[in-house]
Amino acid sequence: MPESQSTFFDLVAENNQDVIDAFNDIINAGDIKVTYVPGNHDLLMTEADVQRILPDINQARDNVQGLGSYITGANSEIIIEHGHRYNFFCAPDQISNRDITNNNSSVLPPGYFFTRMATSSVTEGHPASNNTLPDVTANSKDESQNGYFLYRESWKSMVTALPVKEKLTDKVIKTNIDGYTQDYAIGDLIPNLTDGILDVNLYKGIQDTWEERQTLNGVKVKMPVSKAITGASDARFTDAQAKKQFFDRDDSKRIVVFGHSHVARIVPSSNMKNKKTIYANSGTWIDNAQGYPTMTFVVITPPKSGSAIETVNLYKYSADKTITQWEEAQAITN
């Protein structure tokens, strides 16, 4: 990492200059309102960072670093979020590791370190690995220990699915970010059994602070930590939050759009007043690792006539510059 995080973001922008230039051309033309909503891969990017790189872009931010919601539509019936707010591994963590970072504003969740491991696995070509985690038995009578067990099992699955050539004990994760200064090993993130007790070096007690994290992150309908941990890797678990957090509690919201999971889809449902609602996931532009389509995007079209409020469509862009409909369009009515 460079000495400053702002320098890091400038270098990322420079490395993707064609993309940045394209966005700035659209912004400067003034015909389209371009809005930035924070996601889990840019938790540390401040309002000033975005403004410096993309001058005059609209920013939809919460009062929590790394979160934002964009509310739009004629009757404010559309809400667009990244979706990481509801993910145990990816939601901002304002509690863990503060004694390590000595930083009262540190927010990086364990998903940050998982992403670095996953990136190494991809760039290394998913190498053969001897990294294994021994089986342990859950202590279901102790809620905290059971939480550690579920957290460990998630890491165990990730280490298996995304192997790296480095050993779990190798201090290969360099930081200098968000208050972290040390070098860490993947094993520092995984609870291990000592004298019959599970404990961990980084994110100590994370399973016990999930309730408070949800409060800090503005989650309206909270979920128990066991479901949050086991559902974190399931795209449909994230998608289901559209109904739980919005449609089932706020009848003014009729369309919710997330990204995050990288799995594009449109899901019609109904709200608390039995009116039709639509959830859409925009999918991903570049991540082809999951076997789902890439270069997908959502378009919400206002009505031209009749009683329809909006039509929600999911499209796929192809390398030959053609656009095709990916799923059947859905429309809602008054």
Image: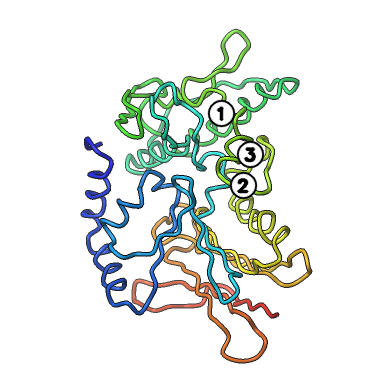
Q: Quick one: label 3 or label 1, which is nearer the N terminus?
A: 1
Could you tell me residue 102's position as x and y percent? Answer: 38, 24
Q: Which residue is mark 3?
A: 230
Amino acid tagged 1: Ile
Q: Dot 1: what SS?
A: helix
Amino acid tagged 3: Thr
Q: Nearer the viewer, mark 3 or mark 1?
A: 1
Could you tell me residue 13's position as x and y percent? Answer: 25, 54
Amino acid tagged 2: Val
Residue 293 relative to residue 25: left or right: right
| Contact? badges 3 and 2 (CB < 8 Å) | no
Could you tell me residue 315's position as x and y percent? Answer: 49, 73
Q: Which mark is residue 235?
A: none
Q: Nearer the viewer, residue 181 or 161?
A: 181
Residue 74 relative to residue 240: left or right: left
| Gap in angstroms between the C-alphas marked 3 and 2 | 18 Å
Q: Which residue is mark 2?
A: 219
From what the image shows, is residue 256 above or below residue 67? below
Q: Dot 3: what SS?
A: helix
Could you tell me residue 314's position as x and y percent? Answer: 53, 72
Q: Residues within 10 Å of mark 3 (few under 14, many from 20)?
A: some
Q: Which residue is mark 1?
A: 206
